[in-house]
Amino acid sequence: MNTYQFNYSIYQRPFRQPLKTSHGAWKIREGIIIKLTDSAGRSQQGEIAPIPWFGSEAIDRAISCCQQVGEQITTAQIYQIPDDLPACQFGFGSALIAFDADSATSDRSPIDISALLPSGAAAIERIQALSAQGYSTFKWKIGVLPIAQEMAIWTQLMMALPHSAQLRLDANGGLTEPAAEQWLELCSGEIRIEFIEQPLAPDAIDRTIELAQKYHTPIALDESVATFDRLQLVYDRGWRGIYIIKPGIAGFPWRLVAFITRHQLDVVFSSVMETNIGATAALRLASSLQLSRSMGFGVGDWFGDDL
Ligand code: MG
């Protein structure tokens, strides 16, 4: 068992513009950077970036977890972080495994990243600029504007989208069943739609399974599988579609990797709007799993700073 010196610092990052989702507007990302230093003086960082409205602990609870640790922490104490602190489990867990990852060589091909578009009509121009930067997978939030208006924008968006590119539509659980069916119907003839993400409310698993059987458009679950508990539950209920997983709030990284591997899940890794520290840890997991789908980490330009 190892003992590590422990330090942490809290950060606040304002979004350039509030991030609008069907949960409301998100203005400031608060998180914690932790640092573990071993007896040889080597240090590794980890990031705790909670999203309470997505099922993780609140930032206050994460801060008190760090305060309680004091100046030192052991490997055993890290393993004992409870399941109701999943962002803390990830932050401490990823710092811990980084001590091993550091010595391993990582000569992989660059990872394909999906770029998040602004909601509404602003996406049309943005898709052209991002295509020029080399992005070929995009994500656009739906369920934000009235459906007729959004579908009209979608038509324009599909004209702006390069032929070889792919678009993901993310409803954040905000669609009614008739609206979800309209979107699935609209997209079923368009192969550039990679999937519709979380069309229905997080607990509507059985109904989402029925929709997945009825339409060609693939469906991904996100909010439904936000925590490790829910991921297991949804798998047991019979979901065999795509899983959007936010490693940053999915608990201990080694437990997540074991579950995905054991059940051969079709997975997209996604951002929790973390800094490079958390993103690097998540990308390292993705590369160990050799995920084939683009990851949802193209969010750097949503912040005014350069963390
Ligand atoms: Mg989503």
Image (tube, rainbow, N blue to C red):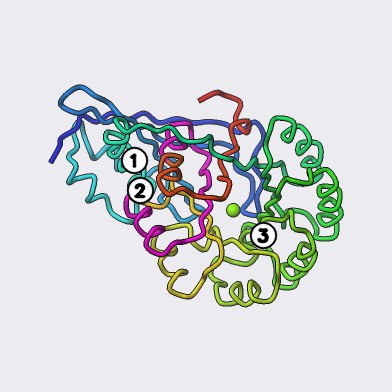
Residue 253, label in figure: 2
Q: Label 1 vs label 2: CA separation? A: 6 Å
Residue 98 in the image, given as x and y percentages of width and height: 31, 35
Residue at the spot 47% in from the left edge and 61% down from the top edge: 265
Mark 2 neighbour class, 10 Å CA radius: few under 14, some 14 to 19, many 20 or more? many
Q: Amino acid at mark 1?
A: Ser
Residue 236 in the image, given as x and y percentages of width and height: 43, 73
Q: Label 3 vs label 2: CA separation? A: 26 Å
Q: In the image, which residues are magenta? A: 254-281
Q: What is the quadrant of the N terminus in the image?
A: top left
Q: Label 1 vs label 3: CA separation? A: 30 Å
Residue 94, label in figure: 1
Residue at the spot 32% in from the left edge and 56% down from the top edge: 83
Residue 245 in the image, given as x and y percentages of width and height: 49, 53
User: Within 8 Å of ligand 1, the CB of disc 1?
Assistant: no
Question: Relative to residue 201, is residue 87 depicted above or below?
Answer: above
First-in-chain label (1 vs 3): 1
Q: Is residue 266 within the magenta segment?
A: yes
Residue 196, label in figure: 3
Q: Amino acid at mark 3?
A: Ile
Residue 299 in the image, given as x and y percentages of width and height: 60, 37
Q: Is residue 101 within the magenta segment?
A: no
Mark 3 neighbour class, 10 Å CA radius: few under 14, some 14 to 19, many 20 or more? many
Q: Are marks 1 and 2 in contact (CB under 8 Å)?
A: yes
